[in-house]
Structure formats: C-alpha cells, structure tokens
Amino acid sequence: MSRTPTAVPSPSAPHGVLLADKAADRTSHDVVARVRWLLGTKKVGHAGTLDPMATGLLVLGIGQGTRLLTHLVGLDKTYLATIRLGRATTTDDREGEPLGELVDATHLDPAVLEEAMQALRGDIQQVPSTVSAIKVDGKRAYARARAGEDVELAARPVRIGRFEVTARRTDGPFQDLDAVVTCSSGTYVRALARDLGAALGVGGHLTALRRTQVGPFDVADAAHVPARGEGDDVDLPLRGLGETAARVLPTVRVDDAAAGMLADGKRIPRDPAIAPEHPESRQRRGSTVVAGLDAAGRLCAILEPAGESWKPVTVVPLDARC
C-alpha cells in the first residue's frame, strides 16, 4: 500500500512568503501539501485558493509567514478570463452541465456588450456561484449542490475595478471574450461570466481563468511547484516577512531597544508626530495596524496604536525575523 509522504522536519524551520504559480487541474490544497513536503514544514497556509480549473498566483505563508496572511487575504486580485457567451452551465464554468437553450451569440452588438459590462463594474451586489465554498448551515455550498440540493446564496457586496475585453472571437454559435478583471477579495469571476451572459440574454460561463496579481504581487515573480513525480530538486525562493509586510502595510522603524521589547510582547513608545511610511499602493482600506521593522528591514511585530504607545498584536520571535 502506498503511503502519502509527510513533511520531513527541517533542522532550521523556514519562514517567509512564497509566490507560487499553480498549474491547471491541481487543487490549491495539492500545492500547499507539496510545499509542506518540499520545505520540510507543516506550517504552510494560503491567502486565497484557486479552483482546480484555474491557474496562476497563489500567495503562501511559510512558518511565521502564516501570521501575515490575514493582512494579505483581503487584497484586490487581477485575472485573465475567457468568457463564453451562448450558454450557461450548472457551475458557471466549463466543468458544469449545459443549462438552458443554446443561443447564437455571434452577432452581439459591441455597444450592447459594453453597456452590459458597465453595469457590472464598480460596487455591485453579486450572488456567488452555487458551487462556491461558502458555508450554508455549516456545509459547503458546493457539497449541497453536488448532493442535489437547491442552493440559494445571498448577494454580497463586491467591487469590480476593471472589466475589460481584450479580444473577441467566434466558435460556432458561441462568442468567446478574453477579458481582464480586477476585483475585490470575495468576487467570483465565474459569477461575473454568468451575470454578463444573463444580462445579454444569451447565457454565459467561464472557460479559462488565470490569476495574475494579488495586490502588489505578480505571477511573473512566482515559482513553479512541481507535483509529485516531477522531481524534488527545486528552488522555492521565500520572500522575507519585512519585505512582504512593507508592500501591503504602513511601516515604522524600531531601534534595537524597541525590537528587544517587542520580542517580549511589550509596548513601545509612539511619537504621534511621526507618521508611518505607506506603501505606494495601500489596499488594506480602513486598517490601522502597521508593520514594525528593525534597522535591517526585518519584521519584528504587527502593531496598532494605543495612546502614546505601539501595542504589538502579532510578535515575530527573534529567530524567525526576516
């Protein structure tokens, strides 16, 4: 009987953030499990999964990097999507069964298409796909749908910052749209394809999806994680916690004395006259926390203001600072 390999303990546990480029037909959890094995640590988490059909950027926290994930999961995301107009499916993507009648969508007026897309931009209310991972009475929506249950999910607010067609082509009665989508966390691009097709009266579903950006992080900088059987000799470059935090959170510099205090979970003095340094594009709207970095740019703690002090809400141990 074959056994699933477990992570081999590393003599020096790794810490940091890994950008991974997920291949098609692999689950995000497959990638997480593989990274655990390759890096020899059980402590690996993610800042948002991708469907097996989708490819592209997964942001993974390793070791103490998992404690940064809460500040990464809410970042905006950018996708390259292909939407097929002409028929809806039960899952809102190519893996579902055809739903409704086949409609010739090859002669859609570009102006009508643009009007329908414009209505889906900005702050909208979106009903998630019935095969999403949202829990309904403690059970995943996709599990209920696959069990034959009728699943009704409430609409939720999302923000579509960009929804732009980059190419159009026909395939029989279908019209395929290549599009760029930039959206808030929690948006379902499958549902966007579904809603566009419904608004045009022709039905629509997603046939391809690739995530290219999560906040300031780009898939061009991501590493391929080989599947089992593809070899174990691979370099998985980890980003430092300080470097990562500085991309998404305001930062304050702390001296050696303050860094030592933070290691013990103590508050450090705060000068209200000195404003934290902000990243070029801050996406964590409404957040008051900052990253405390030492002179070398290593993350010491995540801090929040408390009167004339900085209060540590997440402390990085001395031996894990990077």
Image (spheres, rainbow, N blue to C red):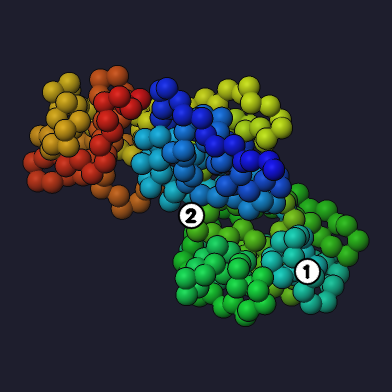
- Left or right of residue 303: residue 189: right
Type of the residue with mark 1: Glu
Front residue of this view, candidates 194 and 13: 13
Q: Is residue 120 visible?
A: no
Q: Mark 2 or mark 1, which is nearer to you?
A: 1
Q: Of helix, strand and loop, which one carries label 1?
A: loop
For label 1, the crowd category at 10 Å Cα-Cα, with few meaning under 14, some 14 to 19 and many 20 or more, is few
Give the image location of residue 232, x and y in percent.
64, 26
Q: Could you tell me which residue is drawn at 75 percent across and 60 percent down?
A: 95
Residue to which mark 2 is pinned: 185
* Above or below: residue 47 compared with residue 176: above
Front residue of this view, candidates 161 and 184: 184
* Above or below: residue 269 compared with residue 206: above
Q: Is residue 133 visible?
A: yes
User: Which quadrant holds residue 316?
Assistant: top left
* Above or below: residue 80 compared with residue 133: above
Give the image location of residue 312, x and y in percent.
20, 40
